[in-house]
Amino acid sequence: MKPVNDLSQLRNLGAKSAEMLAKVGICTAQDLRQLGAVQAYLRVIESGSKPSLNLLWAIEGALTDRDWRDIAQDEALPLLLAVEDAQKPIS
């Protein structure tokens, strides 16, 4: 099976999500895999966009080939904690 490299072809990511990611330099599935869900989500936030948490769930689901609703139900807290940790200033 050939790996999918077009963001909008990944599970959970539609045209709007792919557009938000592309605006911050995440243009391929490989780019997304290299960054991971948390860093990709943070890049979108840092660009001035105000994505809902559904984008975080969708990205994680795209990377793990699972439905975003399963991510929101089963992994919301660990992902939110990872986002919070990543936003803390380095001291």
Image (tube, rainbow, N blue to C red):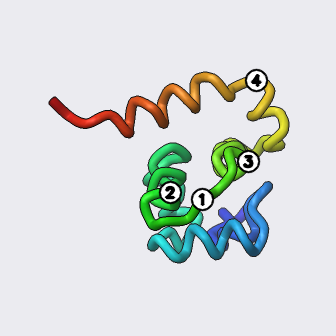
**Image coords of residue 3 (percent x, y):** 66, 63
Which label was assigned to residue 45? 2
Residue placed under numbered mark 1 in the picture? 50
Residue placed under numbered mark 4 in the picture? 74
Q: Give above or below for 42 relative to 70.
A: below
Q: Earlier in the sequence, mark 3 or mark 2?
A: 2
Q: In what element is the residue under mark 1?
A: loop
Disc 2 marks a residue whose amino acid type is Ile
**Image coords of residue 71 (percent x, y):** 75, 34
Q: In what element is the residue under mark 2?
A: helix
- Label 2 crowd bin: few (<14), some (14–19), many (20+), radius 10 Å: some
**Image coords of residue 1 (percent x, y):** 74, 60
Q: Earlier in the sequence, mark 3 or mark 4?
A: 3
Residue placed under numbered mark 3 in the picture? 54
**Image coords of residue 81 (percent x, y):** 51, 26
Residue at the (50%, 54%) spot, across then down: 40
Residue at the (55%, 65%) spot, across then down: 49
Q: In what element is the residue under mark 3?
A: helix
Residue at the (79%, 41%) spot, across then down: 66
Q: CA distance from mark 3 to mark 2?
A: 13 Å
Q: CA distance from mark 2 to mark 1?
A: 6 Å
Asked which quadrant contains residue 27, the reply is: bottom right
